[in-house]
Amino acid sequence: MSFISEKVAYLDGLADGLKLKDEGTDKVLRGIIETLGAIAEALEEQDESIDDLSDCVDGIYEELDDIESALDEDFDGELDEDDFIEVVCPHCGETVYFDEDMIDSEDGLICPNCNETIEFDIPGIGESADD
Ligand SMILES: [Zn+2]
């Protein structure tokens, strides 16, 4: 029970003790106290709703943080991944990176810096294809 509800219950007790002779006045007083009780209840429900919403927003922020750090990891780790192979282009001397899938492809490797085709011999890759 909230602080307001306690106050309302206290007022209700006071009204009991009054023993008003005038029925009309008693009705109005009880009506006011009842209305206050309803307002207190509505406020409590809203408090609960706000708490739920806050939890929900906290959850969203946490998920956003997770997504953000996952994206950061992907970005930072891109060139260090085992799936990428570092190659120095024989044409322009630039260090470029290729996906393993690209090295397996029959189209050959195109240097992203100078657009020349890079002949690239790794033992076990493309051995049977050309020779
Ligand atoms: Zn190049």
Image (cartoon, rainbow, N blue to C red):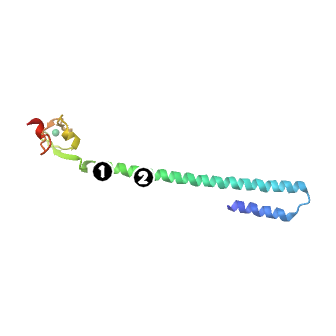
Query: Looking at the rendered structure, which numbered label has been put on residue 121?
Result: none
* Quarter of the rendered structure image containing ligand 1: top left
Residue count near mark 1 (Cα–Cα under 10 Å), binned few <14, some 14–19, many ≥20: few
Q: Are marks 1 and 2 in contact (CB under 8 Å)?
A: no
Q: Where is mark 1, residue-wise?
A: 76
Q: Position of residue 86 (x, y in %)?
A: 19, 47
Q: Is residue 99 visible?
A: no
**Direction left: furthest residue:** 131
Between 115 and 42, the residue placed more toward the observer is 42
- Compute the Cα span from label 1 to label 2: 16 Å
Q: Secondary structure at mark 2?
A: helix
Q: Is residue 56 visible?
A: yes
Q: Where is mark 2, residue-wise?
A: 65
Which residue type does callout 2 highlight? Asp
**Direction bottom: furthest residue:** 17
Between 26 and 101, the residue placed more toward the observer is 101
Rendering quarter of residue 93: top left
Q: Position of residue 78 (x, y in %)?
A: 28, 48
Residue plotted at (64% across, 52% down): 46
Please, is residue 16 above or below residue 79 in the view?
below
From the Cβ of disc 1, is ligand 1 less than 8 Å away? no
